[in-house]
Image (cartoon, rainbow, N blue to C red):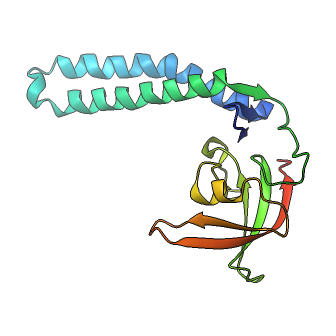
Amino acid sequence: MTQTSENVTWLTQEAYNKLKDELEYLTGPARTEIAAKIAAAREEGDLRENGGYHAAKEEQGKQELRVRQLTQLLENAKVGEAPASTDGAVAPGMVVTIAFDGDEDDTLTFLLASREYASADIETYSPQSPLGSGVIGHKVGEDAEYELPNGKKASVTILKAEPYTG
């Protein structure tokens, strides 16, 4: 899955189906389960001092937030392959290899994509992250700069940028 500047999220069919299944669960069985927990906690009495009630309401809030996130994500989703970078520049949906401060031995390879697509197979950086936004638009061989959490700047060299193939 990748995001583009037009706020479109490109998803593989597998990723789209997985997110859609999660949304269907959260808006169906999960809502029924949380409603039952809240009802059971209400029956225990005074709601001001009812830890089970407050925990269930907090869980419900987190669940509804995730429903809104998934709904928005799926509304803006395009299923298929992300458009290839036509000019050879780093773009969302690419696997990027960088060298820190020009040191060819200190490298990092990552997928530049939405965190929704993060997996154990490859480290994922969001295009909105400091590193992600710093490398977007740069071509192989170019240096890019990004801001560290302490406010200092770091420099990296783009070694490789290829479309992600899954």
Q: Residue at x 30, y 31 (%)?
A: 58
Q: Residue at x 65, y 67 (%)?
A: 145
Q: Is residue 114 above or below residue 48?
A: below
Does residue 31 appear left or right of residue 49 in this picture? right
Task: For the N terminus, give its image quadrant.
Answer: top right
> Residue 67: x and y, percent?
50, 24
> Residue 100: x and y, percent?
68, 76
> Residue 92: x and y, percent?
74, 46
Along the viewing direction, whichever of 45 and 7 lies nearer the viewer: 7
Q: Residue at x 60, y 48 (%)?
A: 128
Q: Residue at x 22, y 30 (%)?
A: 54
Q: Is residue 81 above or below residue 99?
A: above
> Residue 69: x and y, percent?
53, 29
Does residue 35 appear left or right of residue 102 in this picture? left
Q: How many marks?
A: 0
Q: Is residue 105 above or below residue 85?
A: below
Q: Quadrant of residue 61?
A: top left
